[in-house]
Image (cartoon, rainbow, N blue to C red):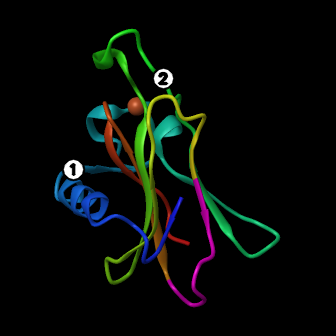
Amino acid sequence: MAASGEIPQAWVDKVKELLGGEIFTKEQPGKWEGKAGGHVPVVSKNDDGTVTVKVPHVMKKGEKDEDDHWIEYVFVQDAEGNIVAMNKFTPTDAAAAISFQPEAGKTLTPFGYCNLHGMWKGEQF
Ligand SMILES: [Fe+2]
């Protein structure tokens, strides 16, 4: 899990590029009607003040690479467009979730990127 300031620039550049494409939401799943449940990031606030953002998607390593299906990135963006928390996952990771300490007073938006079903945005928190 990369904290803000430690996030590799290559990851940031990649998701900024992906954010320039289509972004799906629960209300607007577009061509992925019916897929919101496994792709929209879910935010939960923990007792210690941290926040967990999880995408409740399968993490599947196929027999061939083209059969892989997983959440490659989970990240959180602030209102200025800065990425304040992020991790990159592989198909063999157990789950696509990040936990971090949010800065007080910030409006944040969670995102998850599926290798097959693209970029999904969750509700601001
Ligand atoms: Fe997917």
Asked if residue 100 is among those painted magenta in the image, a careful observer would answer: yes
Q: CA distance from mark 1 to mark 2?
A: 24 Å
Residue 42 spot, x, y in % from top left: 58, 52
* Viewer-nearest of discs 1 and 2: 2
Residue 101's mark?
Answer: none
- Quarter occupied by the C terminus: bottom right
Q: Residues within 10 Å of mark 2 (few under 14, many from 20)?
A: some
Q: Residue at x 76, y 66 (%)?
A: 46
Asked if residue 103 is among those painted magenta in the image, a careful observer would answer: yes
Question: From which residue to which does the magenta span run?
Answer: 98-106
Q: Which amino acid, by three-letter code, is at mark 1? A: Glu
Q: Which amino acid, by three-letter code, is at mark 2? A: Lys
Q: Residues within 10 Å of mark 1 (few under 14, many from 20)?
A: few
Q: Nearer the viewer, residue 85 or 77?
A: 85
Name the residue at the top extreme: 63
Judged from the image, the secondary structure of the residue bearing numbered disc 2 is loop
Judged from the image, the secondary structure of the residue bearing numbered disc 1 is loop
Q: Main secondary structure of the magenta part?
A: loop
Taking the image as shown, residue 49 lies to the left or right of residue 9, namely right
Residue 100 spot, x, y in % from top left: 61, 69
Residue labelled with disc 1: 22
Q: Residue at x 56, y 90 (%)?
A: 105
Ligand 1 sits in quadrant: top left
Q: Nearer the viewer, residue 106 or 48?
A: 48
Residue 1 spot, x, y in % from top left: 54, 58
Taking the image as shown, residue 48 lies to the left or right of residue 87, namely right
Residue labelled with disc 2: 60
Taking the image as shown, residue 66 lies to the left or right of residue 68, namely left
